[in-house]
Amino acid sequence: MSDARTLNVWRRWGYRLLPGDLFSYILHLRPAEWPIMAAHTAFGYVLAVGWQGVGRGVSLPEALWALLIWVFFLNGGTLAINSVFDRDEGDIGYLNAPPQLPRYLLHFSVALLVGGQLLALMLPLGFQIAYAVCFVMSILYSVPPFRFKAVAGVDWVINMWGFGTLTPYAAWAATGRPLDLGHVLVLLAFCPLFAGLYPLTQLYQFDEDRRRGDRTLALILGMRTSLIVAVASVALAFALLGWAAAILQAPVVALGLPVAAWLAVLAPWLLRHESWSPAQHQRGMYRALTAWAVTDVVVLLVFAS
């Protein structure tokens, strides 16, 4: 407990500024993930209005409102309720040395999720529906008796759709702009892209998941097969992006940069995984997140007219 509170200077300051366990509530929202979630959500806004639209501030108030609701209320509430039922003792995604669960974390997480749904009513119907779908998936993912995160394959499907496609779609929907086929394919491509990323986020947690009895997708498949699935999924994602480029007459050659970034991550991982430690697998996960960020940027340069 003391180590969790004094792990670094930010935690020491946080616990000094916020009395009792209040800072523990913030930590279990996993703010280290907020920039990643915010960037992928904002991706949908830029894709919808284009770079010129961003410069003119088109639909900017709606986009900022959607960003706050999606990142803080939905994603934060989802991760907090996940912490309640996981009760992890070791490092978890975006939270090293998690502090002891505060007494009312379950109530806090549910309040965030419900509050976000109510706030979503101020935005277009597409955003409301996307939030509601992800709200339901969050409960099914973490809360017994469902706890689909422990059901190999179901956890994968929930994440590939929730984070992969519905997250950027939510920001697109907040603008009120209708979708066309080319941009549907762009948003859809992030479903298999996250399908490739998701098993990579589990490889460093093999021992923790075995101890808890969770049969995650990566545990069922094994490391080598998980990495092969990741390669195949990423290939499918870029096939969809290539199709979108053909429809929208966009410069497909530019997609070579993110393809190279993914190959730089996945090729050595696949070749050397048997000798890697959990810490090396964790570093591999963060390198994959960097490749994802490169993909976001290049796709916007190619498709955001």
Image (cartoon, rainbow, N blue to C red):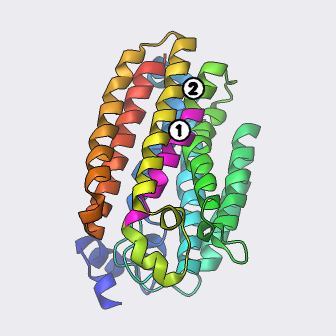
Mark 2 / mark 1, whichever is N-terminal: 2
Left or right of 103, for residue 130: right
Q: Residue at x 35, y 48 (%)?
A: 288
Does residue 122 show up? no
> Of tags 2 and 1, which is closer to the observer?
1
Residue type beneath disc 1 = Phe
Residue 61 shown left or right of residue 135 in the figure: left
- For the residue pair 210 and 22, the one nearer the viewer reads as 210
Name the residue beneath numbered marker 1.
Answer: 190
Q: Check the image and name the residue furthest to the bottom.
A: 2
User: Judging from the image, what secondary structure is the residue with disc 2 in?
Assistant: helix
Whether residue 161 can be seen here:
yes
Q: Residue at x 66, y 34 (%)?
A: 173
Q: Is residue 144 magenta?
A: no
- Label 2 packing within 10 angstroms: few (<14), some (14-19), many (20+): many
Instruction: Look at the image and say whether residue 193 sits in the magenta stretch.
Output: yes
278 is higher (above) or lower (below) than 304: below
Helix, strand or loop under label 1: helix
- Majority secondary structure of magenta residues: helix
Image quarter of residue 23: bottom left
Total count of labels = 2
At horizontal 67% and vertical 54% (from top left) the residue drawn is 134
* Left or right: 197, with 17 as reference point: right
Indicate the position of residue 235 as horizontal and vertical percent values.
Answer: 46, 34
Horizontal and vertical percent for residue 181? 66, 20
To which residue does mark 2 refer? 48
Task: Say whether residue 178 is left or right of residue 233.
Answer: right
Residue 277 on image: x %, y %: 26, 69
**Which quadrant is the N terminus positioned in?**
bottom left
Q: Give how far apart the Cα atoms at labels 2 and 1 are.
A: 15 Å
Mark 2 is on which residue type? Ala
Range covered by the magenta-colored residues: 188-203
